[in-house]
Amino acid sequence: MDFKKIERFIEKVKLPVPKQVFAKNKKQAVEGLKKLRGASLVVMKLISPDFLHKSEFGLVKTVEADAEIVGKTFDELVKLAKRKRRKAKIDGVLIQEKCEGVEVIIGMKRDATFGPVLLFGIGGIFAEVLQDKSLRIAPIKKEEALEMMKEIKGYRLLTGYRGMPKVNFDALASILVRLGNYAVENEKLDEVDLNPVIVDEKKAYCVDIRIVEKK
Amino acid sequence: MKLDKLLNPRSVAVIGASREPEKVGYGVLKNLVKGCYFLAPFCAPFKGKIYPVNPFAVNILGLKCYKSILEIDDEIDLAIIVVPANVVLQVVKECVKKKVGAVIIISAGFSEAGEKGKRLEAEVLKVLKKAGIPLLGPNCLGVIKPTKGLNASFAPTMPPAGKVAFITQSGALADSVIDWAVQERYGFSAIVSVGNAAMLDVSDFIEYFANDEETKAITVYLENVKDGRRFIECCKEAVKKKPVIVLKAGRSKIGEKAALSHTGRMVSSYDVYTTAFKQAGIEVVDSVEELFDVAKANAMLSKCENAIAIVTNGGGAGVLCADYCEEFGVNLVELKKSTIKKLEKSKVMHPAFSKRNPLDIIGDALPERYEVAINTLLEEDYIKGLIVIQTLQTMTRSEDDARIIIEARKRFPKKPIVCCFMGTYFTRRAIHLLEANNVPNYSDPRRAARAMASLIKKS
């Protein structure tokens, strides 16, 4: 996926993302780490159009925010990708501040009959297995977004279940509303995954973003 | 577009009327002349004029035949076309010349039958559109308006008249619904089969029945919609006036484009349909039975707030019903102590009566006990609706129980009563009595709970 395209998308929809830097090489990775000051752990993700599912190939690693470790991990990720797919095109590595919280998925799919459809559900790598979701045809208002979140089976997981943080519903609702409005305006956009969105009492961060545009 | 000439014609021509009982052209004519092909108790002949058109026959079913519609010396409101597809265009042009008010094309062999048929359909549509004549079909069953004694279709018979309109994208499904409706005495204000919907589609009829005074609930069997946003807009308008209930077929993901995202894979086309429906205030159902169960309740009763009680003479049926109420989101209110006291004070309760909701008044309940229970609960402000269950015991007097419920229904017109007189054979008279007095009955507590759920006002 084109990383620049994602950055433009983040900017247009005003999506909240964790502190992050994109490094094309090891040197940029080590330099970039300075921008993530305050983070004790960082997540490093290999960015390549040849690996859509990064974690399945071990191309996502959580490490200490230490220059030496980050540099070493950069090399490891590139080496691993090359080993999995010899001819893989590698754009670089995304380094993000590690977020803690509940993982949800927010998505959009354009339907031929009804137009853009928004999805909210329990997120992460099991999202498709759990199929715990609720849908709305866009555009929606904030009240509808809040109602939509209450409809999923796992709603209790969002309200502070067994020591987990209570999520910031307003932050999630505003992502849903903005994504819906943007999809209505931009017909080229076919599918969007914000998965996971990691959310706690204070904030929601779109940690991984995928967009599919009409050819 | 005005649809009165289609749904309320004074004169009808059947072009392609046949003398052979196995031909569609005979069935359509007989349905007009007699009201139904298979004689049923609710058949009524069409009261307007009927003109069969067939160049080779002198008369059919006692009516004079005409060589062409142009030979008829009368205004024709509705022309029903049953001729083979290859002569339809010519016949349609004659209808335009005759200035008919509306056209139904029953004949098949159009867009459902390949490229050639598609082109033919487009030509027919062009001619009628230009003339401003509404078209139903082609490839459809036709329309039936039992309230007006109009059976302009090749359906097997005529259902009873009632308050439910049924719009269907499958004619064959309507055929069997009608057979069932005769057995169940289920009434329809109209049945419309849209066929290929070259001009008039489901949305047009939703719009029409929303403003039709005879119709209290609109049911739809749907396979696909051409214009999703328009369908939703029509439904949003309609539900302000009466409920719209939709059964949507086609849940399989086969044939759907492979998605590249999690979201894409998690959202099927059926999911999108039901989401759009719910957002428009449409009641979505899963089966033909549920479609007409929900419509029946909505045609007979008004909506209420979510505070419901159950009265039953059988513990098991009551518990089952309570389970289903929870499943469908029907809130069973806790009975207040004061209510229980009133029941105790009546002296007609069995000592072992349940004293909670569901209110089990025990198997030996005579009509008097039902009467006290039903009226005591409905007199309470905090109870907004009632499900009454009756199981058949040796001492049960189901018709008397029915009369008590009908009285209560009149006393408390704003509080819906849904009945579950279980069984059928020895209770059928009571059931007919209930339903003839706008109290819907269901033989299964699950169906009763579902019907009640559809009556709950959305917050």
Image: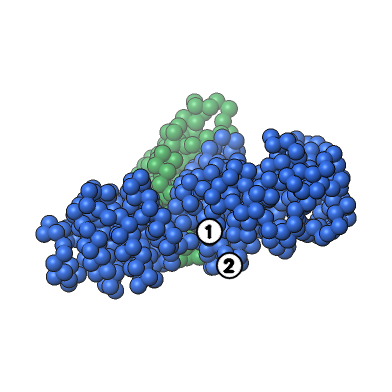
Chain colours: A green, B blue
Find residue A112 and report its horizontal and vertical position in percent.
63, 48
Residue topped by disc 1: B162
At x 33% / y 59%, what residue is drawn?
A: B402
Q: Amino acid at mark 2?
A: Glu
Task: Provide residue B174's location: percent of width, then percent of height.
Answer: 58, 45
Query: For the residue labelled by badge 2, is the local secondary structure a helix, a strand or a loop?
Result: loop
Q: Chain of mark 1?
A: B
Q: Residue A198: tell me if it is visible.
A: no
How far is mark 2 from mark 1, CA to CA? 12 Å
The N terminus of chain A appears in which quarter of the rendering? Answer: top right
Mark closest to the chain's N terminus, 2 or 1? 1
State which quarter of the image contains the C terminus of chain A.
top right
Instruction: State the residue at coordinates (73%, 41%).
Output: B25
Residue A96 vs B414, above or below: the answer is: above
Q: Amino acid at mark 1?
A: Gly
Residue A142 vs residue B424, the one in the foreground: B424
Q: How many marks?
A: 2
Q: Residue furthest left?
A: B351
Q: Which mark is residue B213?
A: 2
Check residue A63 in the rendering and tell me which mark sits there, or answer none. none
Residue visible at 78% across and 51% down in the picture: B51
Chain ID for label 2?
Answer: B
The residue mark sitting in front, 2 or 1, is 1
Say left or right for A169 vs B88. Answer: left
